[in-house]
Image (cartoon, rainbow, N blue to C red):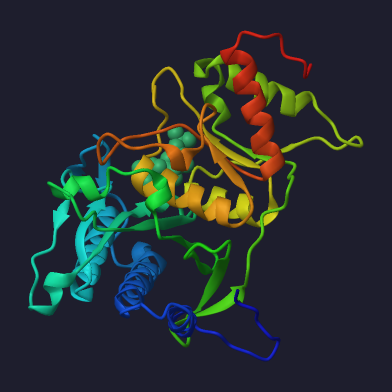
Amino acid sequence: MFEQKDTEFITLSRFVLDEQKWHKEATGDLSILLSSLQVACKFVESIVRKAGLVGMLGEEGSVNVQGEGQKKLDVLANKLFIQSLKSSGCVAYMVSEENKDVIIVEPKSECDKNAKYCVAFDPIDGSSNIDTGINVGTIFGVFRMKEDAKNPEDSFLVSGNNIIVAGYCMYGSSCNLVITLGNNNVNGFTLNPSLGEFILTHPNIRTPEHGDTYSINEGKYTKWDEATKAYIDFLKLHQEGGKTYASRYIGSMVADVHRTLMSGGIFAYPVDSENTNGKLRTLYESFPMAFLCEQAGGKATTGAKRVLDIVPRSIHDRCPIFLGSKENVETVEEFFEIYSNNLTPAFR
Ligand code: AHM
Ligand code: MG
């Protein structure tokens, strides 16, 4: 577990190398892969920062596999991540929100033929917010290539319990990269733009057991299922020591989850009558965030089951998600159990 002393400056590169030291069997490939992700994040950060000045805001004019209009920054950030990960020489397959099919990396050398990692990512999440200067982010999850895989998809169509690294980079008032390699250890790094280095600023992030903030697109209330409606009604009526819950919704998953991870509470994107499986994509949005949240002591559920127990049926599958503080998520689970059993809610 990483402890930081007041006088130390731990860079992300140094942190990753230190992690490698603890794994005698490590070949160094994962460290190289993480370094490539780090470079891509810095690249995207520098572009997001000046996008309005260099004509990089607005629509590209194309539509992705999800049927969503692509922003210029979506397209550029996607290229940067693909190029950077290809250059690492340790990635065999990638899945991106912006690409219909699995991206297969052709080995450039004999050495690259041993590439064993698979990366799923959303290069710019929350991109509908880009043009108004609101926080956006990148989300990523790393898997091992499946040994008995018959085709490239197979390495991704596994339960979330197979994820080995998850993280996000938030491009906001500061640029924050939050990452976990498991072991109940989540660390946050802040980019020092003058040095071009991510410095450990939030060692061993722990999500509070309970939080009094909820984060959900409440404009969809009439389209939610009964369990979600009842849960949100409960939060509004429920007061602890005269204190009401606060509602906070940015509409950028990275920013909403970052706040939830740091300060506690709940973030949700449930099923609604238009998004019958929820909106957020299982592989590159829900899985990495659920893994981060659990590793920080929180929980993540669809309402009916633990998010990381899902096995996606296709690479762009979606799932409903409620994540955050352990106690808050357990209350969600109780509501869903009551409504699935048609019991009378005891909460009111
Ligand atoms: P995107 O990947 O196309 O940007 O969509 C995902 C985003 C999330 O960041 C956010 O939680 C959600 O969509 C917001 O959706 P809505 O505007 O329906 O509330
Ligand atoms: Mg997204």
In the visual, does 56 lie left or right of 8?
A: left
The answer to whether residue 169 shows anywhere in this view is: yes
Q: Position of residue 75 (x, y in %)?
A: 23, 55
The answer to whether residue 61 shows anywhere in this view is: no
Placement of the C terminus among the 4 image quadrants: top right
Q: 253 and 14: which one is in front?
A: 14
Q: Is residue 298 above or below residue 105?
A: above
Q: Position of residue 308 (x, y in %)?
A: 45, 43
Most distant residue in the bottom direction: 7
Q: Is residue 276 above or below residue 29?
A: above
Q: Quadrant of residue 5?
A: bottom right
In the visual, does 314 lie left or right of 343?
A: left
Q: Position of residue 69 (x, y in %)?
A: 26, 40
Q: State ligand 1's quadrant.
A: top left
Query: Residue drawn at (24%, 71%), measured in percent from left and top?
Result: 84
In the visual, does 43 lie left or right of 248?
A: left
Placement of the N terminus among the 4 image quadrants: bottom right
Q: 188 and 248: which one is in front?
A: 188
